[in-house]
Amino acid sequence: MSQPIEFHPSFAERSKAAVNDAHLRQSFRGAMDFLQAKRRAQFPDAAALETLRDLGADIRRYALANLPALLEQLEAQLTANGVKVHWAETPDEANAIVLDIARRHDATRMVKGKSMVSEEVGLNHAMAAAGIEALETDMGEYIVQLAGEGPSHIIMPAIHKTKQQIAELFAAKLPGVSYTDNVDELIRIGREVLRKKFAAADIGLSGVNFAVAETGTLYLVENEGNGRMCTTVPRVHIAITGIEKVVAKLDHVVPLNSLLPRSATGQPVETYQNFISRPRQPDELDGPDEVHLILLDNGRTQAYADVQLRATLQCIRCGACMNHCPVYARIGGHAYGTTYPGPIGAIISPHLLGLADTYPLAFASTLCGACAEVCPVRIPIPDILIRLRNEAQARPGTTAASLRGSGAARTAGISAIWRVWSLIYSRLGLYRLTSWFMSRGRALSPTEQGAWTKSRTPLVPAPKRLRDLLRERQR
């Protein structure tokens, strides 16, 4: 089963708790300011950046425009290279494929490189239920796994934790480890634990940054080396990714990867770049005997089918939209309650999980446009957020309701209010009469006005209408 996720009505409660956590707000604000400054330093030439963004967006749009054909080409090339390709429509199907591979190899231990798609399908929970240890080896992912949490950022999973909290966690969870808040020592402790696991693992699992249809190549980037260990030391390597990660040509990876690390962490380039095209060959000294690729749908075809929403799938998972979002900077990732938080999570989660369970996220935005300004592949996030808001309020059965869960935010009370509003504003006499009663009866205005008065003063009609003031001036 996929990982259970908590949704509304608790989204407002989680957000309120995060806003009231002064330490959390300070930590995130400092981290976001730091990442924004690092990104700016990597793009000193504004004109060159815009040209590169145009190129990146064109590459992703081209891939999506030809997605069915490119996926078939990718499968054919990978199969010819000796890689086994699997298709999964749902998280449960993806987990079942991994479990089947593990059982065929009598595997009991799995080491995992960073993979947000594995978080999306709840793979760790599924493996644990089957008696298989699935250990995260990315240091940030390892920390949140020890803490029993999910990532709070798609690039920096443990960004919400301080070194003191990590020190306490290691001392409590790792046998023989004493408390130390020295960062270098904490990293050394983590590496010592993980190094032993690499050698003992039966299966290594990884994500995929880009899958190249032209050559049948899985491209994976990282900074710690754990991804390379996961994909070469165990005798079986399983890669899992969404169907949208395919690109047409190997040449297309170059500009995309020029955008990715600079947008994500402000690095000129990642420490490790892995090109995986086949299992270990007879004359090669290392590498897995088997390589598998799982291509996951999980609602992506719903986004693909809509011309406007298809842009959601252009994402290269850099996290820049989160780093520049004023809402994310104040509430952090866990408040969203979904695998992908922040602006990108608000527009992709409705396709993965249904709009009925995720529509509050579309309203968790100021629509300031910062996310669109920094997106390296020019996803029009604010436009898509507005579309999702409209979908959430759409009348079921109409052309405006096209997504799974459309109309989830529409209630009988709200519908009645808008019908009355439409009636009043479409009849001049009724409008004049209503406005007269509202101005004369302003003392009866309610002090509680739903969500408006949670953070604002109540609305009270003016003592005189505009037409009354004009009439008095004429006199």
Image: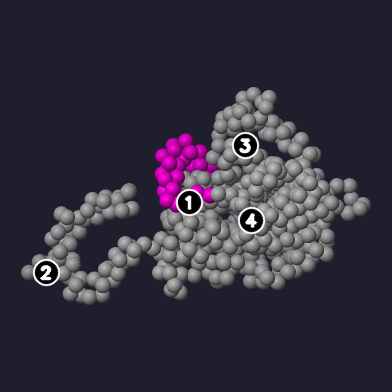
The mark found on residue 92 in the picture is 4
Q: Amino acid at mark 4?
A: Asp
* SS label for mark 1: loop
Going 31% across and 53% down the picture, which residue do you hit? 450
Q: Are marks 1 and 3 in contact (CB under 8 Å)?
A: no
Where is residue 295 drawn, in percent x and y?
A: 69, 60
Which residue position holds label 2? 471
* SS label for mark 4: helix
147 lies above or below 372: above
Q: CA distance from mark 3 to mark 2?
A: 72 Å
Which residue position holds label 1? 7
Marks 3 and 2: which is nearer the front? 3
Q: Amino acid at mark 1?
A: Phe
Marks 1 and 4: which is nearer the front? 4
Q: CA distance from mark 1 to mark 4?
A: 20 Å
Q: CA distance from mark 1 to mark 3?
A: 23 Å
Residue 420 appearing in the image = yes
Query: For the image shown, how many numbered marks are present on the structure?
Result: 4
* SS label for mark 3: helix
Which residue position holds label 3? 146
Q: Main secondary structure of the magenta part?
A: helix
Marks 4 and 3: which is nearer the front? 4
Q: CA distance from mark 4 to mark 3?
A: 24 Å
Judge whether residue 22 is colored magenta: yes
Q: Quadrant of residue 300?
A: bottom right
231 lies above or below 464: above
Going 55% across and 61% down the picture, which residue do you hit? 351
Viewer-proximal residue among 370 and 3? 3
